[in-house]
Amino acid sequence: MSCVFKGSRLFATRFLRYQLYNKAVVVYLRGEIIMLDDRTIYTVEDEGGDRTTITLDKWVADILQEHLEDVHGWVQETYNKVALKRPRLGRRQKGDVVRALSVREALNTPAGIALLDDL
């Protein structure tokens, strides 16, 4: 799966389009719109050693917690990879990439596949 930035929109898969707008996340799954209000906040260290937060949708965090042993560590590691490979991205854009990668990871789990199959 590839991710392409176009302004404030992030495209993930043919089933899923992630749009970040006014801090509200709208997920389009096969034409259905699902508003997601619940979020889980993870604290990570940025490149300068300062603490920052990355917010994931609750459904993504719940699936990742079932699938991964240490979700917080995975988020930190993913942030570090994004910061290393794309140092010119701003703080918010790096968070967008981490969120997109977390959705991709969640949808590649058995629970994520079941979620898509139920639609």
Image: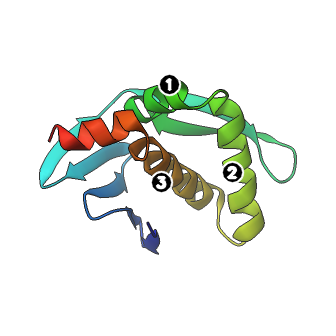
Horizontal side, residue 110 vs residue 31: left or right:
right
Q: Is residue 87 visible?
A: no
The kind of residue tagged 1 is: Glu
Dividing the picture into quadrants, the one containing residue 14 is bottom left
Dividing the picture into quadrants, the one containing residue 116 is top left
**Which numbered disc covers residue 66?**
1
The kind of residue tagged 3 is: Ala
**Which numbered disc covers residue 79?**
2
Q: CA distance from mark 3 to mark 2?
A: 11 Å
Q: Earlier in the sequence, mark 1 or mark 3?
A: 1
111 or 84, which is in the foreground? 111
Q: Position of residue 35 (x, y in %)?
A: 23, 38
Q: Is residue 13 visible?
A: yes
- What count of labels does the image hold? 3
Mark 1 secondary-structure assignment: helix
**Disc 2 + disc 1, Cβ < 8 Å:** no
59 or 70, which is in the foreground? 70
Instruction: Report the residue marked by disc 3.
Output: 100
Mark 2 secondary-structure assignment: helix
